[in-house]
Image: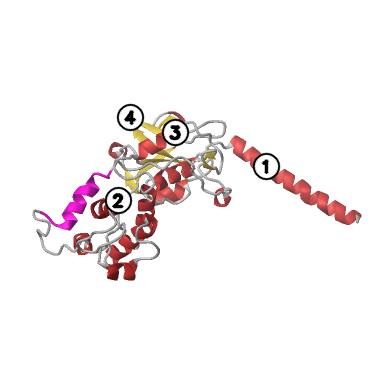
Amino acid sequence: MHLLLGLLGFVLGALLGLALLVSAVVATHPWLAVGALAGSVQVVDDRPAPVRAGVPSDQWPLIASAAQQSTCAVSAEDLAAIAQVESNFGAQLLNPRSGAFGYGQFDAATWAAFGSGNPDSPADALPAIARTLCARGYGVDRTAALNSYGGCLTPMCLGNTDYATAITDVARGYHLQVSVTQVAEQWLGVPYVFGGCSTHGVDCSCLVELIYQRLGINLPRTAAEQFAATTRLSPDQLQPGDLVFFANTYMPGISHVGIYIGNRQQINAPTEGQSVSIQPVFDGYWGAHYAGAGRVTK
């Protein structure tokens, strides 16, 4: 019994010592882009999702999700444009002349081949639209796939244009309605928490991950992985929304990331005891650790 109690005391003492060691490391190495806790933290962003002008607020997240999950990189803007052109986002679910039905104005054969669930529901119809486009070669020839979806197979089938051009014109209006920096500004004031991934506390790389996630773009979790996943830029090529990276802060190599907002400034989740805020990129502490910039491309 004494041996068991002694062993238990040893284990508890070791765990307490480990906890104190972790606390000391965090306290003395504050510039933490990501830590060992990141993999066990649930990603939670409970802020309202930004929407695109003209798209019902409850539908843009579904559109972005269907685009992300498509197997041929169907753009969210094309899906939104099809939804607008075909059913006005579900306001007109049946074409009495052609018999086309549902949110995506499907014919019976198309829905049977690519649909599942309720064709009137955006949640079910949007993935079906994406699957139809992929099956018709969207990843290889977007124009042909769109024209096939719209049943518009001659150059001027809509009078002075074709279906693909009409979709392109509508989709153009959805681009950049919400910018990376606009979404990033919603996070100003959120406290920094090592390994945090919610509006209750966030670290720098999860801040970046969640901001881009809201715009329908998935990025990896760590600063180093985000560096590897982006296209390199020189300082004079930086535009608002690009990522700026820093090295050798709390560990060797790429270890911190911020979002460039212009005028040599970034939105940054800096360190324990501070909040998401606007920081310089090329001056002071960050300037001394600047390691490069990257652009996110879909």
- Judged left or right of residue 261, residue 40 is right
Of all residues, the one furthest to the right in this rendering is 2
If you read the primary sequence from the N terminus, does the residue marked by circle 1 or circle 2 appear first?
1
- In this rendering, the label closer to the viewer, 3 or 4: 4
Q: How many numbered marks does the figure carry?
A: 4
If you read the primary sequence from the N terminus, does the residue marked by circle 1 or circle 3 appear first?
1
Mark 1, other Cα within 10 Å: few <14 / some 14–19 / many ≥20: few
Reading the image, the residue beneath label 3 is 286
Q: How is the image coloured?
A: secondary structure
Q: Label 1 sits on what residue type? A: Leu
- Judged left or right of residue 248, residue 27 is right
Label 1: which secondary element: helix
Query: Does the residue at mark 1 contact the one at mark 3 (Cβ under 8 Å)?
Result: no
Reading the image, the residue beneath label 4 is 263
Marks 1/2: CA–CA distance: 60 Å
| Secondary structure mainly formed by the magenta segment | helix
Residue pictured at 35% horizontal, 52% vertical: 63
Extent of the magenta region: 161-175
Residue pictured at 39% horizontal, 38% vertical: 183
If you read the primary sequence from the N terminus, does the residue marked by circle 2 or circle 3 appear first?
2
- In this rendering, the label closer to the viewer, 1 or 2: 2
